[in-house]
Image (cartoon, rainbow, N blue to C red):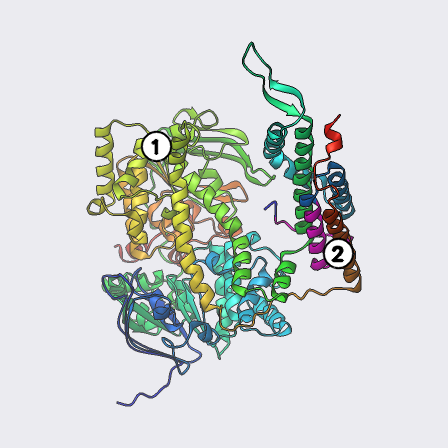
Amino acid sequence: MATITTGIVEIENLWYTYPRAARPALQGLNLTVRAGEFLAIMGRTGSGKTSLCLAICGLVPQFFEGGEFRGKVLVDGVVASETPTQKLASKVGLVFQDSESQIFGVTVKDDVAFGPGNFGLDTREILTRVTDSLSTVRLTGYEDREIDTLSGGEKQRLALAGVLAMKPKILLLDEPTSQIDPVGKDEVFLVVERLREDAERTVIIVEHRAEEIARYADRIVVMDSGKIALEGSPREVFGQVDRLYELGVRPPQVCELAHRLAKSGLWSDANPLTEDELLRSLPLKRTGRKDVRMQEERLQVGTPIIEVMAVDHVYPGGREALREVNLTIRRGEFLAIIGQNGSGKTTLVKHFNGLLKPTRGSVVVDGLNTARTTIGELSKRVGYIFQNPDHQIFARTVREEVAYGPKNMKLPKEELEKRVNEALEFVDMQRYSDSHPFLLAKGERQRVAFASIVSMRPEVLVVDEPTTGQDYEGRERMMKMLSRLNQVGHTVVIVTHEMTIVAEYCRRVVVLNQGRIVLDGPTRRCFSQLDVLKESFLAPPQITRAGFELGFSDPNAILTVDEFVDLVGGD
Amino acid sequence: MVFLEYLPGDSLFHRMDVRPKLTWFIVVTFFSLIFWDPLILGGVLAVVLLTGLLIKIPYTKFENLLRALVVPMIFIVGFQTIATPGNALFYIIPSVGSIGPWLPVTVEGLIVGLVFLFRILIMVFSSSMLTLTTPLYHFLALLRKVHFPYQFAFVVTTGIRFIPVLEKEAIMTIEAQKARGADMEASKGFMQTIRAYIPILLPMLINAVRRSENLAMAMVSRGFGASDEWTTLYEIKAKSSDYVYTFLFIAVLCVGVYMYSVGYGVQPPKLWARI
């Protein structure tokens, strides 16, 4: 059969095994991308999404020594695996997940000029490109800013500008928003939307955020075990909800809802993709069934364990991060602290284990005033799990890593052994107890970090962004573990940007805005206060928003797809 | 970043091209390292301080630098004072019976100590004045002008760029370990202190290695090494006044070289030692 070149990217039976890897990352992948197309790649962690990106820009196989490469990758008529990546850079630009490791300049202007400078273009041409690309990513006026003064969203847009300055025909974005806050994500997507309008440009994006993909993508491919498992328009792909679950991908909530309703025979003739489409076609009228009583949440579960009293926190240098914060957390609560970046969330929770001390006011944990108690003493009561496990893992074996905290508590040997075993069992990592933690996959390292706090058996667990950068399955696993700990009596406090996990798991919500608590109460009530949320740059989950439109508002706001289904079909 | 900070301004030194400034720095360095006469060094220090006044460098900047250097300065000057043989003024440990006296403070030692003090001050002030008045890219443009290998120039800038990143990472790691009950202060003894810091240093090291692989990929995918030619955004241009300054500084350097060749001021003054 003669191949007719129709795509700007043509991949044929692509196999790749990384050096020293046990199994291939890509296993016979076939893909054609048309010029001007906006293609989204989805799939669980480890399904080969990043490897595919690297193959398109030639880094796979060229960057890695000793990998095994088979198949053909044609990019704009050039064989990617045989063209030096640097030369290919004018055809394909790749924006990586971590913006920090792809910025080279000391100032914004320097960095955008890095790419074109490498091609030896003349200064005037470079300056024109700098101006143009900064304007495309909406960073005009930032030219002379130093990199470490930028926010996460600004850094990611700068990384994008740096790639655009090389004028590539194909733009590859590998989870460009997985490491940044919602405001930053929206900023990046605003730029992505603008790029989409340019009919000449081909955009390939790896992304977990299904709602955005539903809006922007012309086509979605879902990867599994190094191959393409599902392919089609957003409507076709997101319509196959069960299949997506199998592939570790979560579709938009409206698709989940339509699917559930269809399953129970309530509604089968529609396949909505967005909120508007759902509302237009749902056989339930806006006047709806407002009278449905939601189960009353039990909130006041136990005696106070953390009391924050009139706390102000001012950082050295004068930045006021917390103002007049009053908060009581009771034993057994499952609480979410939300707010945009810089609202004071992390500053607040760092007061719980004494990492920060109040400038004014006081924090009392289990009867101890944190101002007069060491972090060591507090860490026995309040465990703090940081977002990135790699900032703490240092030991030679998983067991040793998990034992570090209990060792610092000077526990007797038997007790220590017992706790370490329990913690490893809890995160289901016993079989790795003698493995080197650095050699584990990221999700596994996250579980080790989790166990290393659980082994100290703190009454309170504070978790900073438990689900950032994780896929659907990793997210569910993490939240299920926290739920189990909560059920056996631990108090759980999470700091997060993901509203769906707040709605699904947390019974109480505290909203911070500019260092003040602006909302504090049961999740359902807080998620009904649209105006306050909006002022704090937050939005409730898609399903809750859809519920509002149908009249399910305070105090009957719908929090999950399950609730929605119950309400509609719950006769 | 205390040492590489650029302080925007409009002084004579700010407006001067990087080349005469660098020449000035070399001349000052030459004088301070070659000569041993405290009078000459005192004069050089006065010139440097006068220049500092001219550029209007805030007093606090110097103060911060000095504060960081007090301990090493005392150590170096003290050591020189004691280690130089000569006429003893007094002994730090006087004789008790047949033991001692030990550690004589000599006139020669005081002079040598003073010379070292002047040298440290000159070097610290002149180098920070150079960096405070010169944006980093001027140095890079100069490197390019002299056909310095691009790779090396790139290493320099990337290194500077990542100082704040590493700083942030260090803070996060320290906090993560403290939250697990790590106690950095309580440990006693050298080995124990080192052991206490392993949980902080190791994750940082591993992260740096991981990051370097990502960095390398990002570099290549942005065309690093695509062409032997490379362009920086910045061109440095010497004005006619800059040539005059360079000439002036070189003339001063020649005077210094002449003084050195006839042996003037290159020994600690003998005359003083006889007081």
For residue A549, above or below residue B77: below
Q: Which three-letter amino acid code belongs to the residue tagged 1?
A: Arg
Q: Nearer the viewer, residue A302 or B111?
A: B111
Q: On the picture, is B112 further left or further right than A333?
A: right
**Residue A124 seen in render:** yes
Residue ranking furthest to the front: B262
Is B21 part of what is drawn in magenta?
Answer: yes
Q: Nearer the viewer, residue A52 or A359?
A: A52
SS for callout 2: helix
Residue ranking furthest to the bottom: A2
Q: Which residues are magenta?
A: B4-31
Image coordinates for residue A526, horizontal then vertical, percent: 44, 46
For residue A179, above or below residue B150: above
Residue under pointer 2: B250
- Picture quarter with the C terminus of chain B: top right
**Residue A552 seen in render:** no
